[in-house]
Image: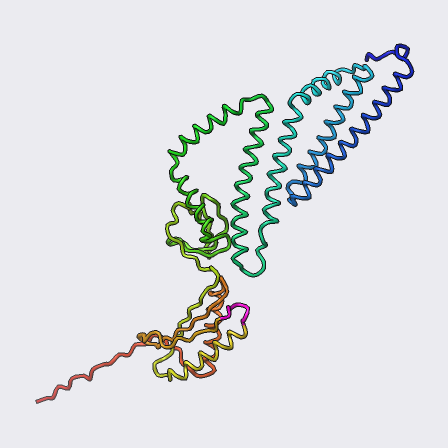
């Protein structure tokens, strides 16, 4: 170890170096604490347990980096040469001063921005619990689309800035990417059609996340959608990925309000007028008992809808809240079955009558 000679410097110069060293230690300590607090704040803002370990290690790396830079400064201040720390510190300071610190800062900001997009999207969207409202569906859909778009934008901008700070010609990369993107767009016309169709689906608010739709032979709830595709999950739990360009006609079964259509069959021998009165009474009781499932429109007993092979079919309509029509129909079928049993009204089932002709009598001569 080679150091400075105490006799070669005056007392004032020595104390000045000591004061500068103490100031450097204090500044480094405050910078380390400020960086650790910033990392902790970002970790709390993202509210993602997966990020805790990342931010802890990042804070430790920040402390180690500042400590190494401090020792390098102190070695230079007191003209101490401790190998290889002196050489490593000198190389680190040069790299940090020229490009390294800006690149590391950009990468940290890029990751923080990527995680903050999730946090902002979660704060923007409304929770899945609560009443089913069109505003909530639209917010959920827009949050998903904006989230995926912003993530791609953050990664792209962060990568371009990092490459630019490393001395790479970003302009040439952008120009090359533009030419390549033009060539790819000609080859990927279906992708362009998917994105354009998805844009108009969002613009016109045709459907959104949480809606129940039918596309062709597929029906289910919209779990996720973006500009390129729509993800459906059907009643059996199967997940269907449908490109937006293939959606030519869509049926939305949960828009603003829904309707439960219940057909009740009774035997031909029953008095139809009496049956209609019983069904009206039970429908009114059901409407008052499950008021939160319905809109302000009362149930409608339309009357005899069909004269079937073995039953007189009476149709009843219930105007329900969105996505409640199936539960309402099942509950009314249960109630009307119990009511018919109490009233002695027969619910028919297919029957078949067979007539046998009388046997021919042969008279003996």
**Quarter in which the N terminus is drawn:** top right
What colouring does the structure picture have?
Answer: rainbow
Let me know if residue 294 is in the magenta part.
yes
Please give left or right for residue 159 compared with residue 188 in the image: right
Q: Image point 58% across, 21% down: which residue?
A: 167
Residue 337 to residue 204: above or below: below
> In the rendering, at what x and y percent does residue 56 appear?
70, 37
Please give left or right for residue 347 compared with residue 10 in the image: left
Q: Residue furthest top?
A: 8
Please give left or right for residue 241 compared with residue 86 in the image: left
Residue 258 to residue 51: above or below: below
Q: Image point 65% across, 45% down: which residue?
A: 47
> In the rendering, at what x and y percent does residue 314 appear?
38, 75
Q: Image point 76% across, 26% down: which residue?
A: 67
Magenta highlight range: 290-296
Q: Residue furthest front?
A: 203
Front position in the image: 146 or 225: 146
Front position in the image: 88 or 249: 249
Front position in the image: 58 or 295: 295
**Quarter in which the C terminus is drawn:** bottom left
Q: Residue furthest left?
A: 365
Residue 310 to residue 165: above or below: below
Quadrant in the rendering for residue 19 = top right
> In the rendering, at what x and y percent does residue 139 appear?
54, 51
Please give left or right for residue 206 compared with residue 313 in the image: right
């Amino acid at each position: 170890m080679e150091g400075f000679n105490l006799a070669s410097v005056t007392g004032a110069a020595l104390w000045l170096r000591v004061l500068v060293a103490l100031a450097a230690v204090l500044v480094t300590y405050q910078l380390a604490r400020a960086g650790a607090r910033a990392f902790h704040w970002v970790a709390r803002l993202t509210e993602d347990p997966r990020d805790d370990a990342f931010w802890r290690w990042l804070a430790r790396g920040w402390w180690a980096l500042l400590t190494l830079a401090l020792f390098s400064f102190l070695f230079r201040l007191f003209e101490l040469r401790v190998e290889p720390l002196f050489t490593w510190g000198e190389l680190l300071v040069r790299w940090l001063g020229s490009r390294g610190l800006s690149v590391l800062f950009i990468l940290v900001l890029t990751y923080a921005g990527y995680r903050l997009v999730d946090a902002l999207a979660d704060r923007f969207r409304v929770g899945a619990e609560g009443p089913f409202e069109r505003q909530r569906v639209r917010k959920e859909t827009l949050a998903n689309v904006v989230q995926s778009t912003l993530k791609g934008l953050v990664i792209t901008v962060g990568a371009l800035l990092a490459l630019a700070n490393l001395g790479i010609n970003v302009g040439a990369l952008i120009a090359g990417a533009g030419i390549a993107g033009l060539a790819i767009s000609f080859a990927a016309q279906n992708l362009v059609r998917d994105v354009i169709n998805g844009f108009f689906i969002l613009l016109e608010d045709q459907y959104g996340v949480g809606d129940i739709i039918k596309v062709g032979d597929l029906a289910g709830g919209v779990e996720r959608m973006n500009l390129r595709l729509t993800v459906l999950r059907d009643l059996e739990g199967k997940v269907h990925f449908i490109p937006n360009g293939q959606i030519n006609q869509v049926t939305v079964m949960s828009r603003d309000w829904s309707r439960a259509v219940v057909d009740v069959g009774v035997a031909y021998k029953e008095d139809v007028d009496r049956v209609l009165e019983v069904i009206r009474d039970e429908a009114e009781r059901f409407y008052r008992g499950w008021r939160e499932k319905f809109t302000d429109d009362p149930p409608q007993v339309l009357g005899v809808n069909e004269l079937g092979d073995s039953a007189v079919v009476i149709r009843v309509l219930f105007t329900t809240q969105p996505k409640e029509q199936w539960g309402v129909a099942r509950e009314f079928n249960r109630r009307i079955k119990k009511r018919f049993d109490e009233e002695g009204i027969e619910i028919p089932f297919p029957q078949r009558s067979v007539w046998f002709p009388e046997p021919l009598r042969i008279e003996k001569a």
